[in-house]
Image (cartoon, rainbow, N blue to C red):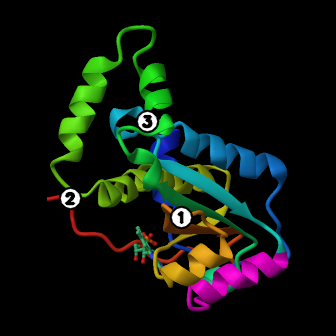
Amino acid sequence: MPSAVLDAIQQRYACRRFAADRPLSADELSTLLESGRLAPSAFGLEPWRFIVVTDAAERTAIAHACYDQPAASTAAAFIAIVALVAALDPDSDYVRARFEAEARGTDPAPIFEAYRAFCQTGSVAEWACGQCNFAAAHMLLQAAHLGLGSCPVGGFDAAALASALRLAAGETPVLVIALGQCADAAPQRLRKPLT
Ligand SMILES: Cc1cc2nc3c(=O)[nH]c(=O)nc-3n(C[C@H](O)[C@H](O)[C@H](O)COP(=O)(O)O)c2cc1C
C-alpha cells in the first residue's frame, strides 16, 4: 500500500554534510514549523519553542556550541527546539491558558487536578524535554518529505547553546535540527531486524 509518510520515513537519514549553496525558502521553513506545531504533547501543554536560525553569524555561533560537528558547521539553517520548563509550573499563566484551551469550553479543574498530581511524581524538566522530541520527529519527517536533508544534533554544550540562542531563564535547549541540501549520497540505513 503506498504511503507518503512511510516514504518520508524511509528517505530520512542523518545528513552529516550540507551543500553550501542551498538556503531554505521561507515556505520550507514555515512548513517545517507547522509540522512541529501540530505535534502531540501530554496534557496538550506544547512545552516548546522553536527558534529558526538562518543568519550566517548566528549559525556559526550555534555550530560552535555543537562542537563544530560538520552537520552543524555546514547547515544552511537550524531549527532549535527549546523546552519551556519554567512555564510548566501548575500556577503559571502559561499552564492556565493551555488548560482553558484544552478544556474546550468545559470546566478545566479536572485537568488541573490531574496535572498537579502528575507534577508530584517526577521531573517536569526531563518530561518537558521528552515532549520536545515529538515536535522534532514531525519536523525531521517533514524535511524528508520536502526533499531536504536534516540532522538532529543533540551533541552540544548546553550553556553555550543557551547563550547563542539568547534563551530566557527557565528555557532548556533540547535539540538542534540542522537543515539544508545534503552534500553526500544517502548512506545505507542500519537498523535491527523487525523481529
Ligand atoms: C536525539 C538525537 C541526537 C542526535 N545527535 C547527533 C549529533 O549530535 N551529531 C550527529 O552527527 N548525529 C546525531 N544524531 C543522529 C544519529 O546519530 C542518527 O539518527 C543515527 O545514527 C541513525 O542514523 P539515521 O538517522 O541516518 O537513520 C542524533 C539523533 C538523535 C535522535
* Residue 93 rendering spot, x and y as whole percentages: 50, 35
Between 14 and 81, the one nearer to me in the picture = 81
Q: Give the total of numbered labels.
A: 3
User: Which quarter of the picture shows residue 92?
Assistant: top left
Do we see residue 16 in this rendering? no
What residue is drawn where x is 80% and y is 46%?
Answer: 27
- Near mark 3 (Cα within 10 A), the count class, few <14, some 14-19 or many ≥20, is many
Circle 1: residue type: Ala
Q: Nearer the viewer, mark 2 or mark 1?
A: 1
The answer to which of marks 3 and 1 sits earlier in the sequence is 3
Between 89 and 173, the one nearer to me in the picture = 89
Write down the residue under mark 2: 194
The answer to which of marks 3 and 2 sits earlier in the sequence is 3
Circle 2: residue type: Leu
Write down the residue under mark 3: 95
What residue is drawn where x is 85% and y is 75%?
Answer: 21
Circle 3: residue type: Val
91 sits left or right of 167 in the view? left
What range is drawn magenta here? Answer: 56-69
What residue is drawn where x is 58% and y is 83%?
Answer: 160
Write down the residue under mark 1: 169
Would you say the magenta stretch is mainly helix, strand or loop?
helix
**Quadrant in which the C terminus appears:** bottom left
* Residue 17 rendering spot, x and y as whole percentages: 64, 82
What residue is drawn where x is 44% and y is 29%?
Answer: 96
- The relative height of residue 143 versus residue 80 in the rendered view (above or below) is above
